[in-house]
Amino acid sequence: MPSVTVEPADPRPLVDGDVVVGSRCTGCTRPDAWQRERCPACLGVCVSERFGPGGIVWSSADVHLAVGHREPPFTLAQVDLDDGPRVLVTVRPTGEVPPGTRVRIVGTDDGDVVVES
């Protein structure tokens, strides 16, 4: 039997310039950072939507160990995008950001969403 190589799914949202390309449910209006045909909450039909570039930090943390290709230290944050979903982002410059801080998406870094505080 031939061996099959399966590439893992990339869980990061798609960024186009300075916005996240996701979807919103036409039924319950739930925003999602990923393009979906059906809403995972109510199974309603989803339509494509763009979120950002602005948002508010929900939480952040400095990471002090190497993760994948990233060398420490670097900062990760959960950001509530304006009228959109919460996404995990890399913060520039590195350093914890207080909750409630306004940030802006500035693109990607090897597929990761990057914000400036």
Image: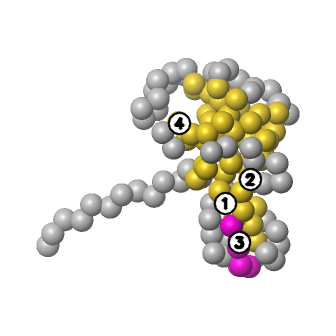
Residue linked to disc 2: 51
CA separation in Å, label 1 and label 2: 7 Å
Separation (CA) of disc 2 from disc 3: 13 Å
Count neighbours of disc 4 (C-alpha within 10 A) and say few if under 14, some if 14 to 19, many if 20 or more: few
Where does label 3 land, which residue? 47
Q: Quadrant of the C terminus?
A: top right
Identity, as a three-letter code, of the amino acid under mark 1? Gly
The answer to whether residue 50 is magenta is: no
Q: Residue 22 appears at what percent x and percent y?
A: 66, 60
Picture coordinates of residue 6 (x, y %)?
Answer: 32, 61
Amino acid residing under circle 4: Asp
- Marks 2/3 in contact by CB < 8 Å: the verdict is no
Residue under label 1, please give it. 22
Query: Is residue 77 or residue 54 the one in the foreground?
Result: 54
Whole-percent x, y for residue 97 in the image: 75, 26
On screen, residue 113 versus residue 46, left or right, reads left
Q: Which of marks 2 and 4 precedes in the sequence?
A: 2
